[in-house]
Amino acid sequence: MTQNNIVAILKDHPIIPVVTIHSEEEIDPIISKLKEMNVFCIEVTLRTDFAFEALQLIKDRYSDSLSLGVGTVISEDQIDKLVSIGVDFIVSPGLTPTLYNHLLASSIPFIPGVTTPSEIMRAIELGCDKLKFFPANLFGGIKALKTYGNVFPQVQFCPTGGVNELTYEDYLSLENVISVGGSWMIK
């Protein structure tokens, strides 16, 4: 299955909240707010020293009601830690052959990030057809994705970076967009 069946996660969750957690006190209010909005998915970034602890706490408390993803994954060591936590999906800002092989071996659904046509072509060569378009707002946004839809019709994207409450529906209306990621839901 392509990318350890990431399509199941993306289809079930067209909006993926991207959050950075600094302390345990932030966790319950964030999850409560998302559930009030009928959002049952979260991508926690690995941008703080507390991130791995936050992932474990969320997994322990909410695994029966929330798909737990992790973003900003850039190394094999991080992937190994995520396997031990048992996260539901992994998001990476980019893709290398080494990272791809480790992601595939993890059996965890994953979506790598791309920006340029060359990066998309490299991802396709490795067998990826679900890609994070990041940062969307800095690299052409909706116009770029429309063009990529013509050039790479086999690829579906999850744009993140600058996607917000004013633009997410426009992104989701594109044929080649399967889901969107953003932080506007919990600001």
Image (cartoon, grey):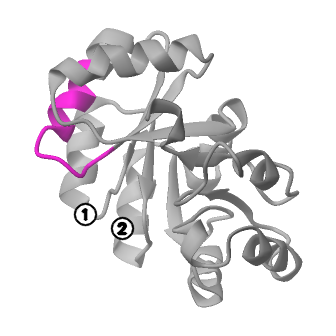
Residue closer to the observer: 138 or 153: 138
Which amino acid type is shown beneath numbered disc 1? Answer: Ser
Q: Is residue 135 left or right of residue 80?
A: right
Q: What segment is highlighted magenta in the picture? A: 45-57
Which amino acid type is shown beneath numbered disc 2? Answer: Leu
**Magenta span contains residue 64:** no
Q: Residue 99 carries which label?
A: 2
Q: Relative to 128, is 86 above or below?
A: above
**Magenta span contains residue 51:** yes
Q: Is mark 1 on a helix, strand or loop?
A: loop
Sort mark 1 into few (<14), some (14-19) or many (20+) by Cα contacts within 10 Å.
Answer: some
Residue labelled with disc 1: 75
Q: Position of residue 58 (x, y in %)?
A: 30, 21
Sort mark 2 into few (<14), some (14-19) or many (20+) by Cα contacts within 10 Å.
Answer: some
Q: Position of residue 124 (x, y in %)?
A: 65, 75
Q: Where is residue 171 in the image (x, y as percent from the top left)?
A: 76, 55
Q: Relative to 59, is 112 above or below?
A: below
Q: Do the residues labelled 1 and 2 touch (CB within 8 Å)?
A: yes
